[in-house]
Amino acid sequence: MEITFKILRFDPDKDKKPYYRKYTVKVEPGMTVLDGLNEIKWRQDGTLSYRRSCRSAICGSCAMTINGVNRLACNTQILLLKRKTIVVEPLRRFPVIKDLIVDMDDFFEKIAIIKPYLIANSPAGPRERFQSPEDRKLLDEAVICILCGACTSSCPSYWYNKNYLGPASLFKAYRFIFDSRDEGTEERLRIISDRDGLWRCHSIFNCVEACPKSLNPTYAIAELKKKIVTTKL
Amino acid sequence: MIHHQHDIVIIGAGLAGLRAALETSQVADTAVLSKVFPTRSHSGAAQGGIAASLANASDDSWEVHMFDTVKGSDYLGDQDAIEILVKEAPATVIEFEHMGVPFSRNPDGTIAQRRFGGHSRPRACYAADYTGHVLLHTLYEQCIKHGVNFYSEFYVVSLIMNKGNCCGVVALDIIGGELHIFHSKAVMFATGGYGRAYKITSNAHANTGDGLSIVYRIGIPIEDMEFVQFHPTGLYQHGILVTEGARGEGGYLLNRDGERFMKRYAPEKMELAPRDLTARAEQTEINEGRGIDGKDYILIDLRHLGAEKIMERLPQIHDLALSFVGVDCIKEPVPIQPTAHYSMGGIPTNKHGQVVIDKDNTPVKGLYAAGECACVSVHGANRLGTNSQLEASLFGRRTGKTMAEFLQREEGFTPLPEDAAKPAEEEIAAILGNEGKESVAQIREELQVSMMDNCGIFRDEKKLQKELEIIKGLQERYKHIHIDDKGKRCNTDLIDALELGHLLDFVEVIVAGALNRTESRGSHYRTDYPKRDDENWLKHTLAYRTDKGPRFDYKKVVITRYQPTERKY
Ligand SMILES: Cc1cc2nc3c(=O)[nH]c(=O)nc-3n(C[C@H](O)[C@H](O)[C@H](O)COP(=O)(O)OP(=O)(O)OC[C@H]3O[C@@H](n4cnc5c(N)ncnc54)[C@H](O)[C@@H]3O)c2cc1C
Ligand code: SF4
Ligand code: FES
């Protein structure tokens, strides 16, 4: 089946402003949007630029906007979208470097702000720290996050205030604050209770819809809010 | 040209590169270069687990782990290196836990362990089926904590040597398009595997084995390249991995008759036989017409594990099977086929991570390697699952330590030679200036398909000869490529072309090595020489580049505790 890919192109070295370019791709069942982009890049137009690596939804390289929704190109099947035209655009509100490649520096800096590493000062001893399966379960979702940016890019609070930490960063904070081995809760709660922290989340749930790993950052943020009110800082 | 100077330059931000960087960045000015953002490295795709004889799930010891690994390697693994691997494994995993890795847990709070192929005890420590993802992210988090200096999306094109010493690398900033010279006292390769030499692979697009060709081109040998691991369970037509952990948890392999055919190949271990044997069994079923509907795939059946266990232990597999082959593994068996997975061979190193250039293990000053791109060799002719993340982390750390010690002794920088960047500049200019008719994608496709056909699980002289001819033809055609993108910014067209150039160089060594080795051992199976031949071939291959193709030399296998015997499962 022939499908039209309408791709937002922009090379600031050459183009005055972004423009759409159409390509026709013969699509077989099972083909993903990434396969489609590859087909275009490899056989039609080598100048098209995008990030990809694992092609199995684990490296987080290929988040982009597909028919208006943030998704991973590599695990989105073209035919399941049930459209004759697929519109592909870079992740919203992240500065475009070229075509579908966006600048994620700010995104990663916001992750770094919340001290994304285990803080545990008590001596660990020669063996593993123990953690019950129930405690470990609290982290099931948060540790799966692949840092793809789809959630933060979809968040209206982030659109209106670029200083807002955003759902991915807060989700990472949750991952450590709710880790029974961690001792950095207060430090981190102080950071995220800042005016650009978690109170900017208005539970719009865009991030939940956007997350290609079916994770729920909004729930995590709600848990963090509860934690803050019950913790004396 | 932009110049940088750092004591240490590490190429690669997977488990090996990051673990080394953590070791060195405390004591020396370290830079990590990676063509993908660190957490995008393919270590993150590892699913099943990391081996250590913690004995949390049964009795276990490093001795048993060692024997399993030696036997798994078909006696080609160097036993001094294996002994280090298995003895330091528990400390490596415990250290990971202390860093914050969210391992799955037993009811008593200890790290959970599962069974894996070729291991006689349940010793795979895991986090559900995304173990590599959490190991990689945890190491990256530690690197943030310790302020490691990253150059993300930098593509290393060539190595700089002066009078036999390594003194830096030349890299292309993918985003900006400029060439950069990194002048250093030590360079470490941690560039990972090369599954992209094959059409069906579990590896990422980025896994093109660049590091192998970069060193091979300047006269450093590469070792045991004929040993390529095919994983028995790749999703049909995609090659995406279904972890061996799925069989570790109890999954069955079924042919068209619904038969658990492994009983005919490994009656004792069944589905948990090592990968070389299981992949061959599967390919035999397919070749003899017992694939599903007579096609080139079989099934892995997880249904009897039940929804709860599948969602708790194998959630990613559930997702992947749904997304890519449209199968809910709780309700239906999943179509699978063997997939090119892992490279046992690589850049030869000693136990300290120093790159060595001959059969006497003479080290190159300033050059190091660890992880999948290296060959120490702990995996010999066949790697056991979960030993590789262990190797990458553990030898990554050891190599970091060796480099840190080297820097204590080493005062100054070896001066850069004149025109240090010339080979890289010329290579890039040649690609950008070339107006030939050949397409990069077309050549790559022909390479991947032919490698699958002629240098896959079953090999023979005729097919390998043919593949050598094909590769020579493709190398010739590569000289006449053209690319569309001539710009600087994010020129991924150029990166594709550079990667293909790298692929075309080292694949010749795989094929020539396979042709050269007239025996069957581990993953290397010659239908015309189906027996292991210890008399002539209990030795490592070293391949050196010459204008007429690789020249081979050989290195002794280190045997300390376990003498070679027949390998049965
Ligand atoms: C799907 C899958 C599942 C696996 N599961 C397991 C498992 O359960 N247990 C286990 O033990 N092993 C497993 N393995 C194997 C194991 O994950 C790998 O061997 C190991 O992670 C490799 O780590 P590494 O650090 O050597 O390389 P990688 O993680 O591949 O990293 C390579 C790095 O080198 C960089 N690089 C490469 N070329 C260049 C260049 N030219 N310039 C700049 N940078 C460059 C890349 O950007 C990347 O950062 C699995 C492998 C795969 C593919
Ligand atoms: S929470 Fe989901 S959408 Fe957000 S970065 Fe993580 S994986 Fe991506
Ligand atoms: S390519 Fe890795 S997530 Fe899509």
Image (tube, coloured by chain):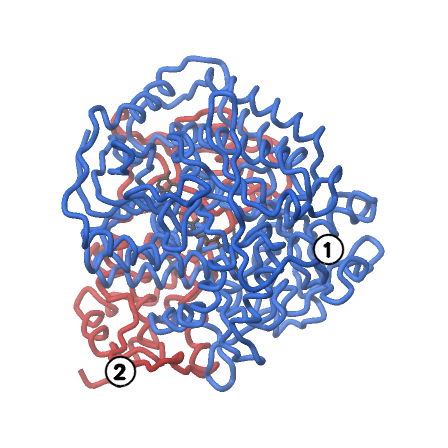
The reply to whether label 1 and label 2 mark residues of one chain is no
Q: Is residue B87 left or right of residue B459?
A: left
Q: Is mark 1 within 8 Å of ligand 1?
A: no
Residue B13 - label: none
Q: Residue at x 29, y 30 (%)?
A: B489
| Nearer to the camera, A131 or A91 | A131
Q: Is residue B450 left or right of residue B482?
A: right
Mark 2 residue type: Ser
Residue bearing mark 1: B299
How far apart are labels 1 and 2 at the CA level?
A: 48 Å
Q: Nearer the viewer, residue B237 or B514?
A: B514
Which residue position holds label 2?
A: A122
**CA neighbours of label 1 inside 10 A, class few (<14), some (14 to 19), many (20+):** many
Is B325 drawn above or below residue A3 in the view shown? below
Q: Is residue A197 visible?
A: yes
Q: What residue type is disc 1 on?
A: Leu
Chain that is coloured blue in the picture: B
Indicate the chain on which mark 1 is placed: B
Please, what secondary structure does the residue beneath circle 1 have?
Answer: strand
At a point 25% along the width and 69% down the height, the residue shown is A198
Chain A drawn colour: red
Q: Where does the image place residue A94, in percent across and percent down from the top left?
A: 28, 46
